[in-house]
Image: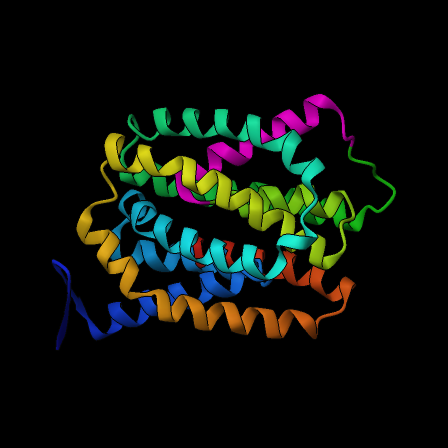
Amino acid sequence: MTFEIASFSFTFYELGLIVAVATLVGMAKTGLQGAGMMAIPMLALVFGGKASTGVMLPILIFADLFGVYYYHQHASLDYLKKLIPFSFFGVVLGAVAGTVVNDVVFSHSMVTIIFVLLGITIWREKSSNIKIPNSFWFVATIGVVGGFTSMIGNLAAPVMALYLLSMQLPKNQFIGTAAWFFLSINLVKVPFHVFVWETITWDTFLLDLSLTPAIAIGAILGVSVVKKIPETGFRWFVITATAASAVVMML
């Protein structure tokens, strides 16, 4: 049995994965950060590594709007002003790199990035006496890497998690700052996906648009669950969920 959406034909299993991805992304953007990382390899199973990034981007933007709506008042503009200019530069670098690598290398790069950033995050969390500097070069590096990984595979969540956890932001401020950051970066990525990589088409957009109910359900679930998670538990949830996504990507 197959399902027709726009010009796509999906099996029941594939459609289930796509709906699950939309729901997980909605949850991620309203606080359950690691859920979005789990969605990335799931969508890649259906569309392939590079093509899936174009399908994923509008889903992320729709979900970003929910995140901004719920947490906009908690965003720290100081962190955004420092990071975003460097992140835009990282997006451009990622767009150039994405034109010269094949799908296998693309997928392997996604796995490597997750594992490296996961290791750094756990090391930082367990070594509370280690102070990560908030210098110009540290912020510039995080910004460029965040933009690059976001463009390459929508993988900037661990980068931002590392930075925002290091800055000791409270739960709601963490979510609000991340929401505005990703909405800004993801909007900048759209022209590259449309005109350079050609991974966003009218058909993929219609597919993404049909997934907005699942995104909304995920967003509501995310807000509800986050309210019940204490500050310390939230930090370790982000780390644990990222670890789970790394294992799924590896398999």
Asked which quadrant contains residue 192, the reply is top left
Residue 123 picture location, percent across and down: 73, 45
* Residue 6, x across and y down, in percent: 15, 60
Q: Where are the magenta residues, as a range? A: 133-154
Q: Which of 246 and 47 is in front in this view?
A: 47
Q: By what rule are the colours in the image chosen?
A: rainbow
Please check the rendered image and state whether residue 201 is part of the magenta-colored stretch, yes or no: no
Instruction: Determine whether, in the image, residue 171 is placed left or right of residue 251.
Output: right
Residue drawn at x 36%, y 43% is 107
The secondary structure that dominates the magenta segment is helix
**In the visual, does 178 lie left or right of 187?**
right
User: What residue is shown at x 34% (from left), y 46% (from top)?
Assistant: 53
Q: Is residue 95 visible?
A: yes
Find residue 228 and report its horizontal and vertical position in percent. Answer: 70, 75
Q: Is residue 249 above or below residue 162?
A: below
Q: Residue at horizontal 49%, vertical 46%?
A: 183
Residue at position x 73%, y 66% in the image: 233
Taking the magenta stretch, the answer to whether it contains residue 151 is: yes
Out of 168 and 58, give the one closest to the viewer.
58
Q: Position of residue 243 (x, y in %)?
A: 57, 56
Quarter that holds the N terminus: bottom left
